[in-house]
Amino acid sequence: MKTREAAAAEDELLLQLIAAVKTLNVAKEWEAGTTVTLKCPCGKVILPPILLSANLLDRQRGLLKSQIERHLRDRHDVAKQAIHRTVKDAFAAN
């Protein structure tokens, strides 16, 4: 079981990551021809810069989701339920 401090730090990390993804979604609006990149608040690059392609937008959004899930699971040892909630919140309509 995690300590209160560890749980609070994890919650803060997840909130910052959700905010970063929402900012990315609003700023780039997932239009073809733009470049997207995402860094975790811990400093590690989750998604290196990729150029969005019109016929691959859904797949690229899925790639970003899977990269976030993998990073949170491997690097931060976040529970599956918290990862699912984080990804859902991050990609929810604004």
Image (tube, helix red, strand yellow):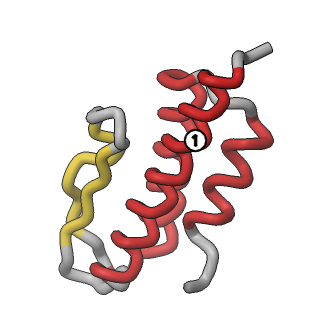
Residue at 42% of width from left, 75% of height from top?
57
Q: Quadrant of the N terminus?
A: top right
User: What percent of the width, then of the height, locates residue 12?
Assistant: 53, 43
Give the residue furthest to the front: 5
Quadrant of the rendered structure where residue 25 is? Answer: bottom left
Which residue matches tag 1? Answer: 69
Is 22 placed above or below 73 here? Answer: below
- Residue 62 lies left or right of residue 28; in this view the side is right
User: What percent of the width, then of the height, locates residue 13?
Assistant: 49, 41
Q: Is residue 81 visible?
A: yes
Residue at 37% of width from left, 82% of height from top?
26
> Are there few (<14), some (14-19), or many (20+) residues within 10 Å of tag 1?
many
Residue at 67% of width from left, 43% of height from top?
83
The secondary structure type at the circle numbered 1 is helix
Residue at 75% of width from left, 36% of height from top?
80
Is 60 placed above or below 58 here? Answer: above
Q: Quadrant of the C terminus?
A: bottom right
- Residue 6 lies left or right of residue 19; in this view the side is right
Q: Which residue type does callout 1 highlight?
A: Glu
User: What percent of the width, then of the height, locates residue 19?
Assistant: 45, 63
Q: Nearer the viewer, residue 32 or 91?
A: 91
Q: Nearer the viewer, residue 84 or 19?
A: 19
User: What percent of the width, then of the height, locates residue 67?
Assistant: 47, 43
- Total tally of numbered discs in the picture: 1
Q: Is residue 56 visible?
A: no
- Residue 42 lies left or right of residue 85; in this view the side is left
